[in-house]
Amino acid sequence: MRIVLLSLIFCFVSMAVHARDTAHDEADIRHLDTVICKAFEQGDAKTLRASLDDRFTLVSSRGELTDLEQNIAEVAKRDPYYDEFRNHDQKVRVYGDSAIINGITSVKGKSGGEAFAADFEFTDTYVYHNGHWLLAASHASRLKK
């Protein structure tokens, strides 16, 4: 009986140590979301690579599907060049080892020498892997002015 009781206590303690707090996860995801925006804005391909899942995909506002390497190359090339790349009005929902964020991305910059400014409704999917949150997929739809 004593062994069973000790085993149960060990299981509960072990689960408590490994359990993550949803509020903490949400804060981590919001922070990573900001880091990713800053990486796009600053052309920081290294930070972007560390923040995105190896199987990352983006469905752009033009309906084009791109992968991790295509996005890293675009950021490294700095075209488009972003003066502003900011997410706001986010709603985060955590589901265990995955999370979804909906919000607005506001961008300003230049592409091909032409200035642009736009807002996009986005949905991002994050996954918790090896102790870290990573952005796994993103979808953006351009908002009408």
Image (cartoon, rainbow, N blue to C red):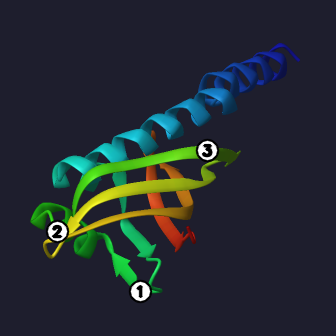
Q: Is residue 114 left or right of residue 144?
A: left
Q: Circle 1 sits on which residue?
A: 64
Pinpoint residue 91: horizontal percent, then vertical percent.
67, 46
* Residue 70 pos. (x, y %): 24, 75
Three-letter code, disc 2: Asp
Q: CA distance from mark 2 to mark 1?
A: 17 Å
Please give the label number shown on residue 89. 3
Q: Which residue is painted at 48% across and 55% down in the image?
A: 105
Q: Which residue is mark 2?
A: 79
Mark 2: secondary structure: loop
Q: Residues within 10 Å of mark 3 (few under 14, many from 20)?
A: few
16 with respect to 120 (left or right): right
**Image position, residue 89 (x, y; %):** 61, 44
SS at mark 1 in the image: loop
Element marked by disc 3? strand
Upstream in sequence: badge 2 or badge 1: 1
Question: Of label 3 and label 1, which has the lower sequence position?
Answer: 1
Which sits earlier in the primary sequence, circle 2 or circle 3?
2
Which amino acid, by three-letter code, is at mark 1? Answer: Glu
